[in-house]
Amino acid sequence: MRGLTKLTLVQLKLYLREPIAAFFTLFFAPLMLLLFGFIYGNDPMPIFGNRGTMDVSVPAYMALIIATVGIMSLPTATASRRETGVLRRFRATPLRPITYLVADVTVYFGMTVLGALLLLTTGKVAYHVRFDGRIVDLMLGFALATAAFLTAGYLIASLAPTARVAQVVGMVLFYPLIFLSGATIPLQVLPEAVRNVAEFIPLTHAVTLLQGLWFGEPWGDHLKEVAVLAGLLVVGAIAAACTFRWAAD
């Protein structure tokens, strides 16, 4: 337990020393909320079920933070540590591999939660966003979506030969994901053809689930979203476990 605590603190320091990763995790979504809130405000609109644009955007931006950490930050950092020999040296220590993985997941999950809390605080203070759901349901949905995308991130890191490749793959996946899933532009205003494509994007289901739980909708209305995210979690975890490499080729 002592080794896990120390390793977690080290991993956290390493994360915070990467200013770009820390910025996009903690401040990018709140700044977007402030920017678009200044443009559109938060007056109720029929297209959003008499909710404001910011009421709809806050849970969507939570999914944006999840994708940022899982698709961008985690793969690049993990592949970089493997490429520079950090993972190989860690593998030679008395600590078990599971200790590293638990510490790593704890840091990434914790940073994702912190980013979401900053977003929620910004939305509540600046625009008095409306929350109609149950906090426990929202937390469970957030945890499921985060876990699913973290496993996807480990899979990318496992398959990418270098950190640069992991970064490029992450960027190629990230931008279509966030712009077509409703994580940045509400699905309600997108053309029908785009919404049809969005059904095949995993992040769409994270956005839809978090928005539904934010609005107070029951879990029974989102069984498809839960199934997609749970499937991504299970398949991603198995694939990442089978392909994860501690040393560069």
Image (tube, grey):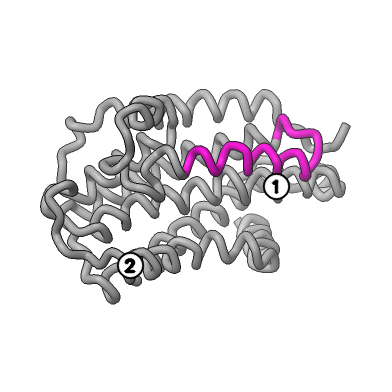
What secondary structure is found at the residue carrying circle 1? helix
Q: Residue 4's mark?
A: none
Q: Quadrant of the N terminus?
A: bottom right
Above or below, 30 against 77 in this view is below
CA–CA distance in space, label 2 to label 1: 34 Å
Q: Can you tell which quarter of the image residue 205 is in? A: top left
Q: Vertical placement of 131 versus 67: above or below?
A: below
* Front-most of residues 20 and 137: 20
The answer to if 176 sits in the magenta stretch is: yes
Magenta residues (range): 158-178
Measured as percent of width and height from the top left, residue 48 is found at: 18, 49
Tell me which amino acid carries mark 1: Thr
Q: Residue at x 71, y 40 (%)?
A: 166
Q: Residue at x 54, y 43 (%)?
A: 175
Identify the mark at residue 39; answer none if there is no mark: 2
Rate crowding at label 1 as few (under 14), some (14 to 19) or many (20 or more) other CA atoms within 10 Å: many
Asked if residue 102 is positioned above or below residue 9 in the image, the reply reads: above
- Three-letter code, disc 2: Ile
Residue 70 percent across, percent down from the top left: 55, 45
Give the camera-side residue of 127 and 12.
127
Q: Main secondary structure of the magenta part?
A: helix
Image coordinates for residue 88, horizontal then vertical, percent:
84, 43
Q: Earlier in the sequence, mark 2 or mark 1?
A: 2
Q: Which mark is residue 76?
A: 1
Q: Is residue 17 visible?
A: yes
Which x, y percent locates residue 39? Answer: 33, 67
Residue nearer the viewer, 21 or 35: 35
64 left or right of 222?
right
Q: Are marks 2 and 1 in contact (CB under 8 Å)?
A: no
Residue at the (55%, 50%) spot, across then down: 69
